[in-house]
Image: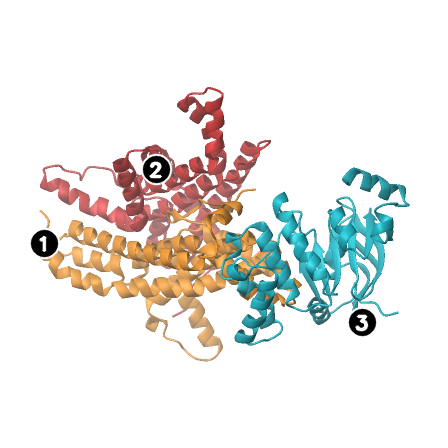
Chain colours: A red, B orange, C cyan
């Protein structure tokens, strides 16, 4: 075994990997969008008075918490078409990215639902009661009083969830989507693996930088949003 | 449409892979959390140089996806081990190192980074007066930390550590990519010959769900033991608000003031 | 003349903010010194420097002939000094992870190296004195503020310190609970132990203090017997303060 590691070449691989950035971003944004909508529905169900809805949403959240993202991807991508075929549906034409977006949406929806629920609860009953006391209807009170405060509370968690989601997009390569990670693997395969360490480090650095940007944005957003208001303490 | 025979035949084989998954998780948590506590103390006491290095390390581990960390560990460590062997004059056959070691190292570092954040906020959540009271009756810093501050901060940290641990168990599924035959890899291997993916992955999902469920209950029991001294009123007074996630699980504590 | 506590030229600042500007004080054994003063006058900081919870920038502190130089001290000196003093905190600061009995026993076991049985016996006696015997297995969070503060006093008392420092021991309490704590402190004062009490309770000072010290702006403005100081203060600043507070 010889040491073929050439650290000076790492940065040179960054542009190549970055070519797949749009794919990664597309997966990220679509998953976040769909996940937020799903998450809002689940959070609403979880906060409702209906016992059945509450149980179902808690069950969904705890199921998603228990399953590794990779297993969910395999289950949907490899398993689902097998079942679908049995009932006469051919899923082989569906784009691989769709599977990834579906998996990540499902996964992140549980996290986002939890985030929405705890932020909502953190605002405190008193705020709602005060809104009712001046004659607001419950939806108006939610929209004008509770939601803006809950959003401020949720920003840091939202930032964290987006970072987790971004990192999870790297699993898209598992079913052959050419996201940044997939691109990295392709680059390393092209040289028969001789530069794989350098390529993975380059990919890692890109993710790191993206993560730092997201973290910084989340902090500035929190600062800008909560400026002049006192953050509500649970 | 679901092959029952396959399930019956392969279940014992997948079960055999549960120990390696759990061993990776337990070892990585034990080592990682110890390291994490060290990092938290270093950053809290603002040790020059070390605390800056720790901050960069934590940021890096938070930013880089687990798969990439696993690959880096898998490809970089053998080179390091080999070169180290040469430098002390022996030739080490790095192929003898089981791949689980590389996975455990990557997972350990990941846990160290995340748990250091958990420990940092849980140490902050213990009132400064507790340490002062320890001093006031003549305790040393070490006595105060170990007898008073750590037990309290551990009780605060447990829900988050529980989240970290469940995330870790799920994270071990990625060790598949560095050639560890844990649950996911074993299921995949069994499914490939006859395309029994749906059966294999339903079973895998079931196993992970059961493991998560049991661990969750276990952590709840530990939590209730540790926090017997904290009644509800105290919890509220401390303004602890858990929200952050990790691998899709409840994570670090945030303090709102 | 032998003094129990001697403070010499204590200076303390936080950043640019000078809190103590050269405080001198000599306290005899058995004296109960009550420190009065508006908030921000440095009285709590003074108390905390005696226990080295805040270390002063300049000056020296000596307790029963053990002298520590504030700008040049070793860790072991600080520990030694702390073992001669005990503190009762405004927010009680009971160890949250320990029961009331364990709170009181902690110092005996860890610092004084008692065995458990002995420590328990002595602790129960003290808890009986402060009226908390039935509550000894409760956690602090299960008790009222007054009960917690009495436990705090027991925890300080059991270390058999040369001087007990009380930092506004009743300020965090609901008004109806102040009495029980003041009565406990009064009982402690009758045992002849040296005490320094920072408080806003003027009537308590009148009853219990052997000397009253008035501080403002980081300096001692006036001191004297409570009967003189509180009735006929000489300094205009003291007069103003007392007029506002009574």
Q: In the rendered view, tell whether residue A22 sits above or below residue C218.
A: above
Closest to the camera, between mark 1 and mark 2, is: 1
Q: Where does the image place residue A93, in percent across and percent down from the top left?
A: 19, 37
At label 2, counting other C-alpha atoms closer than 10 Å, the crowd grade (few under 14, some 14-19, many 20 or more) is many
Q: CA distance from mark 3 to mark 1?
A: 86 Å
Q: Where does the image place residue A144, in percent across and percent down from the top left?
A: 47, 24
Residue holding disc 1: B4
User: Left or right: C28 with respect to B42?
Assistant: right
Query: Tag 2, which chain?
Result: A
Helix, strand or loop under label 3: loop
Q: Same subunit under labels 1 and 2?
A: no
Q: Where does the image place residue A106, in percent across and percent down from the top left?
A: 30, 40
Residue holding disc 3: C65
Query: Tag 1, which chain?
Result: B
* Quadrant that contains the C terminus of chain B: top right
Residue B71 at least partly seen: no
Q: Same subunit under labels 2 and 3?
A: no
Q: Residue at left 49%, top 26%? A: A130
Asked whether the residues under the numbered discs 3 and 1 touch, taking CB atoms below 8 Å apart as contact, a structural biologist would say: no
Q: Nearer the viewer, residue A234 or A181?
A: A234
Q: In the rendered view, tell whether residue A141 sits above or below residue C88.
A: above
Residue B4 at least partly seen: yes
Label annotation for residue A31: 2
Residue that extends furthest to the right in the rendered view of this protein:
C234
Query: Tag 3, which chain?
Result: C
At label 1, counting other C-alpha atoms closer than 10 Å, the crowd grade (few under 14, some 14-19, many 20 or more) is few
């Amino acid at each position: 075994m010889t040491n073929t590691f050439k650290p000076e070449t790492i940065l040179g691989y960054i542009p190549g990997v970055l070519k797949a950035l749009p794919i990664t971003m597309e997966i990220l944004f679509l998953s976040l969008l769909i996940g937020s909508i799903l998450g809002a529905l689940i959070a609403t169900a979880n906060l409702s008075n209906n016992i059945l809805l509450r149980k179902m949403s808690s069950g969904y959240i705890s199921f998603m918490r228990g399953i590794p993202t990779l297993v969910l991807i395999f289950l949907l991508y490899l398993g689902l078409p097998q079942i679908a075929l049995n009932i006469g549906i051919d899923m082989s034409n569906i784009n691989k990215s769709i599977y990834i977006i579906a998996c990540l949406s499902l996964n992140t929806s549980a996290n986002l639902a939890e985030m929405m629920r705890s932020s909502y609860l953190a605002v405190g009953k008193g705020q709602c009661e005060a809104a009712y006391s001046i004659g607001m209807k419950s939806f108006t009170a939610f929209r004008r009083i509770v939601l803006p405060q809950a959003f401020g509370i949720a920003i840091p968690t939202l930032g964290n969830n987006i970072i987790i989601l971004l990192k999870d997009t790297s699993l898209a390569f598992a079913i052959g989507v050419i996201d940044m990670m997939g691109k990295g693997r392709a680059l390393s395969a092209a040289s028969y693996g001789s530069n794989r360490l350098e390529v993975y480090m380059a990919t890692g650095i890109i993710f790191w930088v993206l993560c730092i940007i997201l973290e910084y944005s989340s902090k500035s957003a929190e600062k800008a949003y909560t400026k002049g208001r006192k953050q509500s303490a649970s | 449409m679901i092959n029952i025979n396959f399930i019956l035949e392969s279940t014992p084989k997948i079960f055999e892979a549960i120990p390696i998954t759990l061993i990776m998780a337990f070892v990585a948590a034990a080592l990682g959390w110890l390291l994490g506590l060290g990092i938290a103390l270093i950053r809290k006491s603002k040790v020059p140089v070390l605390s800056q290095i720790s901050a960069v390390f934590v940021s890096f581990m938070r930013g880089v996806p687990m798969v990439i960390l696993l690959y880096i560990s898998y490809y970089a460590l053998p080179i390091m081990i080999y070169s180290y062997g040469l430098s002390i004059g022996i030739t080490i056959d790095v192929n003898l190192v089981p791949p689980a070691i590389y996975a455990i190292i990557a997972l350990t570092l990941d846990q160290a980074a995340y748990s250091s954040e958990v420990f940092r906020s849980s140490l902050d959540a213990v009132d400064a007066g507790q340490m002062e009271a320890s001093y006031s009756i003549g305790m040393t810093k070490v006595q105060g930390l170990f007898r008073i501050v750590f037990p309290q901060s551990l009780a605060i940290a447990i829900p988050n550590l529980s989240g970290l641990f469940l995330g870790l168990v799920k994270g071990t599924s990625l060790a598949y990519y560095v050639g560890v035959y844990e649950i996911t890899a074993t299921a995949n291997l069994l499914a490939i010959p006859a395309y029994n993916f749906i059966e294999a992955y339903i079973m895998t999902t079931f196993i992970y769900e059961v493991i998560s469920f049991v661990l969750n209950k276990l952590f709840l029991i530990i939590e209730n033991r540790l926090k017997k001294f904290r009644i509800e009123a105290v919890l509220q007074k401390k303004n602890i608000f858990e929200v952050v996630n990790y691998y899709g699980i409840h994570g670090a504590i945030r303090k709102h003031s | 003349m032998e003094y129990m506590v001697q403070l010499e030229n204590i200076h303390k600042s936080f950043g640019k903010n000078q809190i103590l500007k050269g405080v001198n004080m000599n306290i005899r054994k058995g004296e109960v010194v009550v420190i009065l003063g508006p908030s921000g006058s440095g009285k709590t900081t003074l108390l905390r420097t005696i226990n080295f919870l805040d270390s002063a920038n300049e000056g020296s502190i000596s307790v029963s002939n053990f002298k520590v130089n504030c700008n040049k001290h070793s860790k072991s000196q600080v520990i030694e000094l702390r073992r001669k003093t005990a503190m009762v905190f405004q927010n009680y600061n009971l160890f949250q992870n320990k029961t009331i009995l364990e709170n009181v026993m902690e110092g005996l076991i860890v610092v004084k190296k008692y065995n458990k049985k002995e420590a328990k016996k002595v602790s129960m006696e003290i808890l009986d004195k402060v009226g908390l015997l039935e509550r000894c297995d409760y956690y602090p969070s299960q008790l009222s503020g007054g009960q917690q503060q009495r436990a705090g006093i027991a925890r300080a008392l059991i270390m058999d310190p040369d001087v007990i420092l009380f930092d506004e021991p009743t300020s965090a309490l609901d008004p109806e609970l102040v009495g029980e704590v003041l009565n406990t402190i009064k009982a402690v004062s009758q045992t002849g132990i040296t005490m320094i009490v920072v408080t806003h309770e003027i009537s308590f000072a009148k009853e219990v203090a052997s000397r009253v010290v008035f501080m403002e702006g980081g300096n001692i403005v006036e001191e004297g017997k409570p009967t003189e100081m509180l009735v006929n203060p000489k300094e205009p600043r003291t007069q103003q303060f007392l007029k506002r507070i009574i």
